[in-house]
Amino acid sequence: MKLSDQEMRHFVSCVRELRHSAPVQEMRAYRQHGATTTYDHCIRVAYASYFLAARLHLSVDWERLVRGAILHDLYLYDWHEKKSGRPRLHGFRHPGVALQNARRHYQLSPLEEDIIQNHMWPLTIRSLPKSREAAIVCLTDKICSLAETVRRKEGGNRRK
Ligand SMILES: [Fe+2]
Ligand SMILES: [Fe+2]
């Protein structure tokens, strides 16, 4: 899963501003799956979303696709720990928390809001992705989450 040099330059230009902002950097403090931080997960989902759209020659808003993907899990707590500000039913509620945080810190477009709010479909059955970009992130989020979980299990097995 490798972008061409030109695609990589464009991807980096899309992530640059957000990547260095404090709320996005804060995601480095939280674990997502195994050793993967929420920050690493979001960057990975952004990269995979760009890659998928590029390889399928989809017509997308590249910058908003990448920005929405980076912000999709901006819920800013450790979901493994009950006392970290985690709401009950994290799986259902964290897209709303991420959207609130993202609105507080950034100027969001409707497309970016769609990506963040609806990335957990079909778990959140009524929160359906409404755009191509949101559907892409909804899909790549699941692929990346699965890969991160499998990697954790393999790492755990190797340590035994
Ligand atoms: Fe999520
Ligand atoms: Fe995610």
Image (spheres, rainbow, N blue to C red):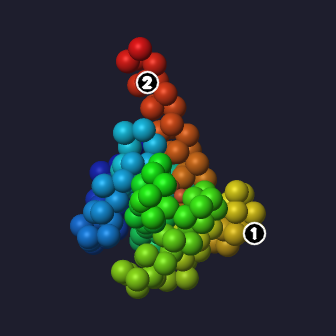
Is residue 24 something one can see in this rendering? yes
- Which is closer to the viewer, label 1 or label 2? 2
Q: Residue at x 45, y 64 (%)?
A: 85
Instruction: Kindly tell me whether mark 1's CB lies below 8 Å from ligand 1.
Output: no
Closest to the observer, 44 or 53: 44
Q: Nearer the viewer, residue 111 or 60?
A: 111
Pointer 1 and pointer 2: residues touching (CB < 8 Å)?
no
Q: Residue at x 45, y 32 (%)?
A: 152
The residue that mark 2 highlights is 156
Which residue is at the front of the view, 146 or 156? 156
Mark seen at residue 90: none
**Residue 97 in the image: above or below residue 77:** below
Q: Secondary structure at mark 1?
A: loop
Image coordinates of residue 104 in percent, x first then y, are: 40, 83
Left or right of residue 160, residue 121 in this image: right
Q: Could you tell whether 150 is left or right of 10 in the image?
A: right
Q: Residue furthest top?
A: 160
- Up/down of 116 relative to 57, above or below: below
- Name the spot of residue 93 as percent of width and height, x first: 60, 66
Residue flagged by tag 1: what amino acid is it? Arg
Q: CA distance from mark 1 to mark 2?
A: 36 Å
Across and down, in percent, residue 15 comes to 33, 65
Q: Is residue 47 visible?
A: no
The residue drawn where x is 51% and y is 71% is: 97
Q: Residue drawn at (30%, 55%), measured in percent from left and top? A: 28
Percent across and percent down for residue 57 are 55, 57
Q: Amino acid at mark 2?
A: Gly
Cβ at disc 2 under 8 Å from ligand 2: no
Mark 2 secondary-structure assignment: helix
Question: Residue most toward the front?
Answer: 83
Give the numbered dot on residue 126: 1
- Residue 70: which quarter of the image? bottom left
